[in-house]
Amino acid sequence: MMKKLVSIILAAAAIMAVSCDPETPVLEVVVQLSLDDSPLNQAGIVVNITDGGSFTADYETSSDGQVQTILPVGVYTASTSFKKSEEGKLLNFNGSVTITLVKDGDLAFNLPLTSSVSSQLIIKEIYNGGCMDNEGAKNYQMDKYIIIYNNSDVEADASKLCIAMAQISSNVSMNKYIGADGETTYFKEGWVPASYSIWWFQDGTQVIIPPFSQIVVAVNGAVDHTQTYSKSVDLSKADYCMYDRESGFNNANYYPAPSASIPESHYMKTFVYGTGNAWPLPMQMAAPFIIMPDNDIKAFVQDPSNFDNKASNLSGNFAKVPQSWVLDAMDLWPAADETKNFARFPANINTGYEVFTSKMGYSVYRNVDKEATEAIEGNAGKLVYSYAGAVDAEDTDPSGIDAEASIANGARIIYMDTNNCGNDFHVRKVASIKK
């Protein structure tokens, strides 16, 4: 509440400042929420309006689902993210719209919403930016991992779960799927592009994740990296690892022999349909997602009809993963720059993105669902508050709960899952497995 109040005060100050300038008109704006092409007449929904810089403010909708405010001429983004229970399912609602205000231009804007259902299995954390070496002279980045978490009180069978990567592009101009209408074409076509390869667990390996528990998947180097680089992480105790050198991903720097403590049956397998000798989990611009296929993933990735090639070679060869298979996704960019960033996923899978700084030993960690976590029977007295593990006080876990300290104290954690990466994650100063 205090953060919201501060943002509104700052926004009001910004409006007052420019409204004194006769060259910068201030206009009355209406933003209408809609769902399935019809107005969503619901009060109390928080809508954020920002220019991506100094101006940001949260507003609540009136009973007709509208936000009415005054803004100086300029370009803004209005967005919202909320959830509600319906027929035993937790539905997430996300949406955003660009507001371009010019004198004598449109003053009414429609903010369309998309809905989705929360997944039992989520990406809890990704560590992909590496750290500096012991002398602080250069970056070390062969120590990446992903944590998959069972965000429910029911045992999860993850045996058929797969890990993939969406488009890896440096900016909006490199989006290979912009249609004539300016929209990303595969959003409407019902699929998501997976780059280079898709990773899966070996046949016959049961991957069971108990309630409120996790598995650590070493993406590179399933060894104890701290023996050489003290600021790195120990992946010798990872539950699973991406290690299939027979696939063509055989770069020894990325894939040294895994620690003996990791059974060979826990080596994940893949089929390479892109270029290179290692699966790229970029330090910046990463877009990982997890999927639960309806059929055999090995047959899927070897069927040419399941691919779309946007290049003269395999560098632009993408597997067309059905959107219905996607359980969870993340969209990471190195800076908040709307002129360069673009959504790699349709809004029914993910909206928003997290800004991530690489090379510092940081991870991207999921925020705690405070209300749901506090409601779990037995959590009282076990939750640890006054969380101070975020890199930036402005981009932190809004729950104030220290998830890792609480788990060590015997608490069970439910994490945020609104399908909005920008709301669901923050940047953590120290990777969670390092404590």
Image (cartoon, rainbow, N blue to C red):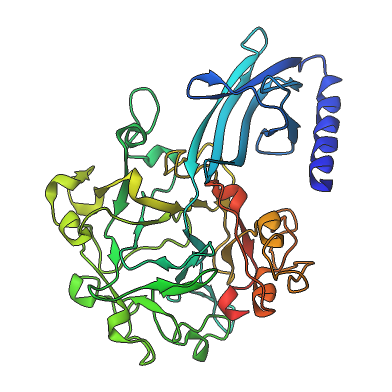
Picture quadrant where residue 99 is located: top right
Considering the image in quadrants, where does the C terminus appear? bottom right
**Residue 7, visible in the rendered structure:** yes
375 vs 219, nearest the viewer: 375
Q: How many marks?
A: 0
Q: Position of residue 133 (x, y in %)?
A: 54, 80
**Residue 218, visible in the rendered structure:** no
The residue lying at 70 percent from left, 54 percent from top is: 371
377 vs 224, nearest the viewer: 377
Picture quadrant where residue 188 is located: top left
211 vs 148, nearest the viewer: 211
Say above or below: 292 vs 175.
below
Of all residues shown, which one is farthest toward the top? Answer: 104
Please give left or right for residue 2 compared with residue 289 in the image.
right
Please give left or right for residue 192 compared with residue 433 in the image.
left
Considering the image in quadrants, where does the N terminus appear? top right
The residue lying at 50 percent from left, 84 percent from top is: 234
Picture quadrant where residue 76 is located: top right
Q: Position of residue 419 (x, y in %)?
A: 52, 47
Q: Position of residue 429 (x, y in %)?
A: 65, 69
Q: Position of residue 415 (x, y in %)?
A: 60, 59
Please give left or right for residue 112 compared with residue 345 in the image.
right
The residue lying at 69 percent from left, 39 percent from top is: 53
Say above or below: 288 vs 37.
below
